[in-house]
């Protein structure tokens, strides 16, 4: 009987003896990942960012569809990495933008953080849809944190939002809120968030950041696969030219041998794969399943962004109130649908911990969340939101929302009249 330890030893010695085959491969992978990590972060650190505050007009009667037009136009920044040289030697990454809603002591601010290169583009797109708005560059609020934050006097709760279901499933959008009261002003989902922020006291802050970057249409492949699965279609088989060629020659040979044996002319048997047609059980689907398929296909008809949604509630411990967190979560819950999709906190980032070293682990998570919101990096994967979903989550409140602490533009500034005499 063979000794298992002896066989294992022989196997190990054999692998080690061929180190010159596998070791360079693993070293190359390690070097490549380290190189990409270095050059991409070096490029990212070289970018100059600007923070723009947008003061909307006093009364907005239109639906968020005009904000959707802003995101559609913004999709044009897709493809900032044009060559392999830029990607692998210079570390150029896809440009991204952060649309933010913050509240500091009850004051509400709509902000857009963008690379300086695209500042004029962002301003032009917003002015095109909101000509009476006012945009000005402002200091980044994350730099004005109180001293000793996360110390004995301050506390923080934060998380990164994620989808409950795969990306192709959509969330509710402003179109669904319009249908609730078609003959009245739209029930604006931003009203819930505006109410939560307006009630903040001195020493309380809420940061809500939508960091987005455009994606190409390849994400729709997952949507089409999901639709096919829901409809009961068989998964498409990957074509193998070599196997198909062998199968074709086998059918021809089989037909020729049959003719030689019987003396009768025989027809070449058709390819069984060609005979099979994708079937569907759509007639057996429930109304909810039919609606899910329709909404998934509707989501795929519009341009999309990859998004990272970050939320932080920061306050002095003497005024820290967990209900403020629940109120912001209530804002996200408005977009949830049982048979479609919803947004929920990602446990990996949520600033709480249980059991062993809970306090230390929670403090570590709070520091991580604070850094993520201060720097707004976007290295990992995000969730896929189309422009309609984005406009539902971030837009200026309409005329039906009463937000007394929202800075608005009462009158549009204009230039001097033509023909004015020069002294």
Image: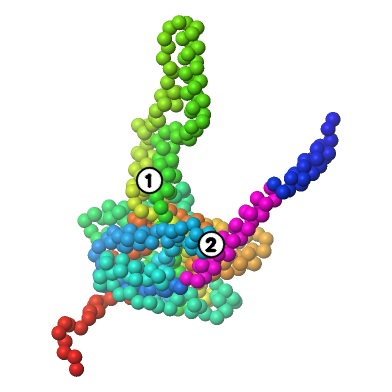
Determine the secondary structure under disc 2. Answer: loop
Q: Residue at x 47, y 65 (%)?
A: 311
Q: Earlier in the sequence, mark 2 or mark 1?
A: 2
Whether residue 49 is visible: yes
* Residue 360, placed above or below residue 276: below
Residue 111 relative to residue 249: left or right: left
Q: Position of residue 337 (x, y in %)?
A: 40, 50
Q: Nearer the viewer, mark 2 or mark 1?
A: 2
Q: How is the image coloured?
A: rainbow
Q: Residue at x 42, y 44 (%)?
A: 221
Mark 1: few, some, or many residues within 10 Å (few <14, many ≥20)? many
Q: Position of residue 224 (x, y in %)?
A: 40, 42
Q: Main secondary structure of the magenta part?
A: helix
> In the picture, residue 396 is in which quadrant?
bottom left
Residue span colored magenta:
22-47
Quarter of the figure that contains the C terminus = bottom left
Quarter of the figure that contains the N terminus = top right
- Judge by depth and name the residue closer to the eye, 85 or 8: 85
- Specify whether residue 41 is painted magenta: yes
Q: Position of residue 297 (x, y in %)?
A: 35, 45
* Residue 404, placed above or below residue 10: below
Q: What residue is pinned by disc 2?
A: 89
Q: What residue is pinned by disc 1?
A: 296
Q: Residue at x 27, y 67 (%)?
A: 128
């Amino acid at each position: 009987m063979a000794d298992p330890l002896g066989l294992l030893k022989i196997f190990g010695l054999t692998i080690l003896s061929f180190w010159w085959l596998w070791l360079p491969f693993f070293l190359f992978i390690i070097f490549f990942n380290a190189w990409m990590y270095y050059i991409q972060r070096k490029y990212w650190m070289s970018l100059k960012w600007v923070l723009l505050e947008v003061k909307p007009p006093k009364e907005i009667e239109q639906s968020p569809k005009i904000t959707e037009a802003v995101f559609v136009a913004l999709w044009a920044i897709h493809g900032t990495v044009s060559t392999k040289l830029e990607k692998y030697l210079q570390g150029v990454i896809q440009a991204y933008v952060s649309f933010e809603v913050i509240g500091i002591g009850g004051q509400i601010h709509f902000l857009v953080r963008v690379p300086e290169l695209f500042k004029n583009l962002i301003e032009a797109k917003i002015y095109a849809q909101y000509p009476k708005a006012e945009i000005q560059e402002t200091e980044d609020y994350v730099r004005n944190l109180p001293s000793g934050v996360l110390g004995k006097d301050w506390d923080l709760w934060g998380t990164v939002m994620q989808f409950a279901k795969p990306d192709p499933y959509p969330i509710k959008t402003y179109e669904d809120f319009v249908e609730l009261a078609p003959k009245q002003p739209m029930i604006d989902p931003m009203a819930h968030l505006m109410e939560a922020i307006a009630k903040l006291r001195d020493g309380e802050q809420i940061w809500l950041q939508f960091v987005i970057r455009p994606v190409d249409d390849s994400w729709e492949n997952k949507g089409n696969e999901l639709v096919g699965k829901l409809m009961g279609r068989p998964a498409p088989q990957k074509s193998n030219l070599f196997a198909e060629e062998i199968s074709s020659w086998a059918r021809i040979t089989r037909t020729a041998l049959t003719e030689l044996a019987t003396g009768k002319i025989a027809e070449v048997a058709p390819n069984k794969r060609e005979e099979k047609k994708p079937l569907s059980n759509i007639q057996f689907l429930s109304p909810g399943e039919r609606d899910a398929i329709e909404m998934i296909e509707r989501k795929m008809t519009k341009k999309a962004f990859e998004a990272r949604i970050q939320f932080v509630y920061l306050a002095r411990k003497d005024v820290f109130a967990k209900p403020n967190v629940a109120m912001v979560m209530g804002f996200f819950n408005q977009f949830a649908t049982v048979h479609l999709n919803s947004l929920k906190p990602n446990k990996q980032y949520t600033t709480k911990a249980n059991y062993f070293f809970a306090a230390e682990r929670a403090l570590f998570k709070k520091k991580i969340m604070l850094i993520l919101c201060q720097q707004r990096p976007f290295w990992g994967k995000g969730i896929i939101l189309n422009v309609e979903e984005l406009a539902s989550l971030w837009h200026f409140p309409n005329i039906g929302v009463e937000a007394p602490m929202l800075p608005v533009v009462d009158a549009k500034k204009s230039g001097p009249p033509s023909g004015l005499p020069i002294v």
